[in-house]
Image: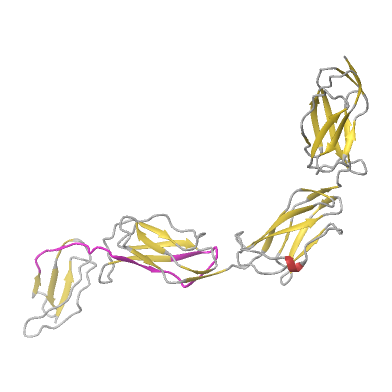
């Protein structure tokens, strides 16, 4: 009975074997490059031994990759997979030293950067995001024919845990505005598979809210419209109709009454051809500043030669502008909303001295 050993610690050697008529033929795989030897020793008489001449060992070139990955994954959650470089016989090409590029049909996948292997094997992480059957492919950057693709990985959505409600921080009573809702998982990722129905509520008891039936999401995101009818600080809340723990509330929305007229402050006297400052404030029916006013204002004057801004824009319902009157006498300046002529205001008489 003979025992086999080698200077190659990674060698695949036969088990202890008997010779037939003093001879035997055996298969050996050497896996470490360089000069290697094989030694045969009698198991009963260790002094009866023999070592081969040095064998020059080189790596077999890799021809393809084998990717071992799980068959299922959760959207947005990292998964581990292994890439092995294989030779034409399907053995690990331990000498593979190329650089590998990763790709996937999932356009939102987070994949490893271009990488190298150690001893023909590499372990990596990837995050698949798109629900459905996906794969991961590894390709040699220099030799694209050396490639490999994982088996199908069925990606399922992660359950939503709450809603992110993104609404404007200002609104006007009676004016419709849009807001977006995003379903989030416990890690704060978009829960793209969310397919529930939500109920809308608001601190504004007169708000015109979407009906439950219209709460449709696409890839975890929905767009909706609402009309607030009560001035003050208001919020919008969404609650899943099946699981009340899945809920989200907007930040405060400052709801202002709609502007009904302009208040214009100008000096009582002015010098012809000398600019002066004019202040315009949008007011609601109660005389409060309509902070959410976002229209544009056209200015006109009884002075046909007046130098006026072509269009005035108010910030938070207020604006200050430079005007010049050129004709002596009693003159006025009028501000009118560009889209709604009923919203207007006129200065008191301005005495213009030539």
Q: Nearer the viewer, residue 242 or 333?
A: 333
Q: Nearer the viewer, residue 323 or 304?
A: 304
Residue that protrudes farthest toward the top in the picture: 354
Asked whether 163 or 140 is in front, the reply is: 140
Q: Say left or right for 158 vs 172.
A: left
Q: Which residues, given as a range, are shown in magenta?
A: 52-80
Compared to residue 123, the image places residue 20 above or below, namely below
Q: Please state the horizontal and vertical placement of residue 327, each as a whole percent of the image.
A: 87, 19
The x and y percentages for residue 98 are 31, 57
Task: Say which quarter of the image contains residue 189.
Answer: bottom right
The x, y position of residue 331, in whole percent, is 90, 24
Magenta stretch holds residue 10: no
The structure residue drawn at horizontal position 82% and vertical position 42%, both measured from the top left corner, is 291
The coloring applied to the image is secondary structure
Count of numbered labels shown in the rendering = 0
State the image coordinates of residue 304 (x, y, percent, origin top left).
Answer: 85, 25
Q: Is residue 72 magenta?
A: yes
**Going by the image, does 57 lie left or right of 102?**
left
Where is 194 relative to 115, above or below?
below
């Amino acid at each position: 009975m003979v025992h086999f050993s080698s200077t190659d610690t990674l060698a695949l050697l036969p088990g202890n074997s008997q010779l037939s008529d003093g001879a035997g033929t055996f298969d050996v795989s050497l896996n470490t490059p360089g000069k290697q030897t094989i030694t045969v020793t009698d198991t009963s008489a260790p002094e009866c031994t023999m070592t081969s001449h040095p064998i020059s060992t080189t790596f077999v070139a890799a021809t393809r990759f084998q990717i071992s990955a799980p068959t299922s994954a959760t959207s947005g959650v990292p998964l581990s997979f292994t890439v092995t470089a294989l030779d034409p016989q399907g053995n690990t090409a331990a000498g593979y030293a190329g650089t590998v590029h990763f790709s996937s049909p999932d356009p939102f996948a987070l994949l490893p950067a271009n990488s190298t292997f150690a001893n023909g094997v590499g372990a990596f992480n990837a995050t698949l995001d798109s629900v459905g059957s996906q794969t991961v492919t590894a390709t040699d950057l220099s030799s694209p024919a050396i490639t490999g693709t994982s088996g199908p990985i069925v990606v399922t959505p992660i359950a939503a845990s709450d809603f992110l409600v993104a609404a404007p921080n200002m609104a006007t009573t009676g004016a419709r505005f849009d807001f977006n809702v995003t379903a989030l998982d416990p890690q704060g990722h978009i829960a793209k598979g969310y397919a529930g129905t939500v109920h809308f509520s608001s601190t504004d008891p007169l708000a015109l809210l979407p009906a439950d039936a219209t709460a449709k999401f696409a890839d975890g995101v929905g767009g909706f419209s609402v009309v607030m009818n009560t001035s003050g600080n208001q919020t919008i809340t969404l609650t899943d109709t099946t699981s009340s723990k899945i809920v989200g509330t907007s930040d405060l929305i400052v709801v202002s009454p709609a502007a009904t007229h302009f208040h214009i402050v100008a000096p009582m006297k002015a010098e012809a051809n000398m600019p002066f400052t004019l202040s315009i404030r949008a007011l609601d029916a109660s005389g409060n500043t309509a902070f959410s006013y976002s229209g544009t204002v056209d200015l006109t004057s009884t002075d046909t030669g007046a130098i006026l801004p072509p269009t005035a824009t108010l910030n938070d319902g207020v604006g200050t502008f430079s005007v010049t009157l050129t004709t002596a006498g009693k003159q006025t300046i009028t501000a009118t909303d560009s889209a709604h002529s009923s919203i207007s205001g006129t200065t008191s008489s301005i005495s213009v001295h030539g």
